[in-house]
Image (tube, rainbow, N blue to C red):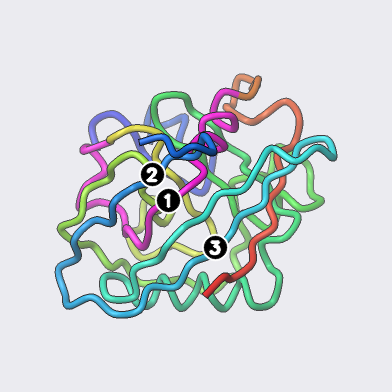
């Protein structure tokens, strides 16, 4: 990629130089058309807190008809409470918010985004879908088949990521919360100054 690189490691990101509104104030998005026949799409609620205060909820819908392995991986992690207490450890205005690294639960901030090498990897499932605002896609290292638990949400359309990362869902409400996350004060490594935690549960 020429401009941005979604990586599990802040170090590799640095080397690569990067890798409507409803009455409630939450954006509703129309689902992207998938390449395959649609089937029941599971939905999840991401509750977001910062310093003990609730920032709001993000509701996402996943695409088992587009990226079944990524959806199965995400669903299995949600079922065991894996994401609860992990952080949105990377916030880049005009680009993405990224989270889901187990290191962000209790390890030093310098390790957030590096990931755990013992985690199960998911083989890439590239598609013809576009990285539009609200898209959910799998974070990875330079290896296309290195995705694990980390994911990112696009805060604007990022066509440079198309065909390079595995899209497996989209945000259907709560983009106002995503915007609040990405605009949080951050350090020189794009990590929020105050930890932004998530708790994820399946809705249907």
Q: Front-most of 168 and 60?
A: 60
Say above or below: 189 vs 42: above
Mark number for residue 17? none
- Contact, mark 2 vs mark 1 (Cβ under 8 Å): yes
- Residue found 32% across the figure and 58% down from its top: 167
Residue 117 lies, in percent from the top left, at 59, 64
Q: Is residue 9 part of the magenta span, yes or no?
A: no
Residue 197 lies, in percent from the top left, at 72, 46
State the extent of the magenta-drawn residues as a range. Answer: 158-183
| Lower position in the chain sequence, tag 3 or tag 1 | 3
Q: Quadrant of residue 19?
A: top left
The N terminus, quarter of image: top left
Locate residue 1 relative to residue 96 in the image: left or right. Answer: left
- Residue found 39% across the figure and 45% down from its top: 28
Q: Residue furthest front?
A: 23
| Lower position in the chain sequence, tag 2 or tag 1 | 2
Could you tell me if residue 111 is visible in this image? yes
Q: Secondary structure at mark 3?
A: loop
- Residue denoted by label 3: 149
Mark number for residue 134? 2
Q: Nearer the viewer, mark 3 or mark 1?
A: 1
Residues at marks 3 and 1, CA–CA distance in whole angstroms: 17 Å
Q: Front-most of 161 and 1?
A: 161
Q: Front-most of 102 and 62?
A: 62
Q: Secondary structure at mark 1?
A: strand
- Residue denoted by label 1: 171
Residues at marks 2 and 1, CA–CA distance in whole angstroms: 5 Å
Locate residue 89 relative to residue 153 in the image: left or right. Answer: right
Locate residue 95 relative to residue 8 in the image: left or right. Answer: left
Q: Residues within 10 Å of mark 3 (few under 14, many from 20)?
A: many
């Amino acid at each position: 990629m020429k401009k941005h690189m979604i990586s599990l490691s802040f170090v590799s990101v640095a080397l690569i130089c990067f890798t409507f509104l409803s009455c409630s104030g939450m954006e509703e998005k129309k689902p992207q058309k998938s390449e395959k026949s649609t089937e029941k799409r599971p939905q999840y609620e991401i509750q977001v807190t910062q310093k003990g205060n609730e920032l709001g909820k993000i509701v996402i819908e996943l695409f088992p008809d587009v990226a079944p392995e990524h959806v199965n991986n995400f669903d299995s992690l949600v079922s065991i409470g894996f994401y609860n207490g992990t952080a949105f450890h990377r916030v880049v205005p005009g680009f993405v918010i990224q989270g889901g690294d187990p290191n962000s639960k209790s390890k030093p901030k310098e390790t957030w985004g590096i990931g755990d090498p013992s985690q199960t990897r998911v083989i890439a499932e590239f598609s013809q879908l576009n990285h539009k605002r609200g898209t959910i896609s799998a974070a990875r290292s330079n290896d296309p088949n290195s995705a694990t638990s980390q994911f990112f949400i696009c805060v604007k359309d990022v066509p440079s990521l198309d065909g390079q990362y595995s899209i497996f869902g989209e945000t259907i409400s709560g983009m106002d919360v995503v915007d609040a996350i990405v605009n949080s004060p951050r350090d020189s490594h794009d990590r929020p100054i105050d930890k932004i935690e998530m708790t994820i549960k399946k809705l249907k």
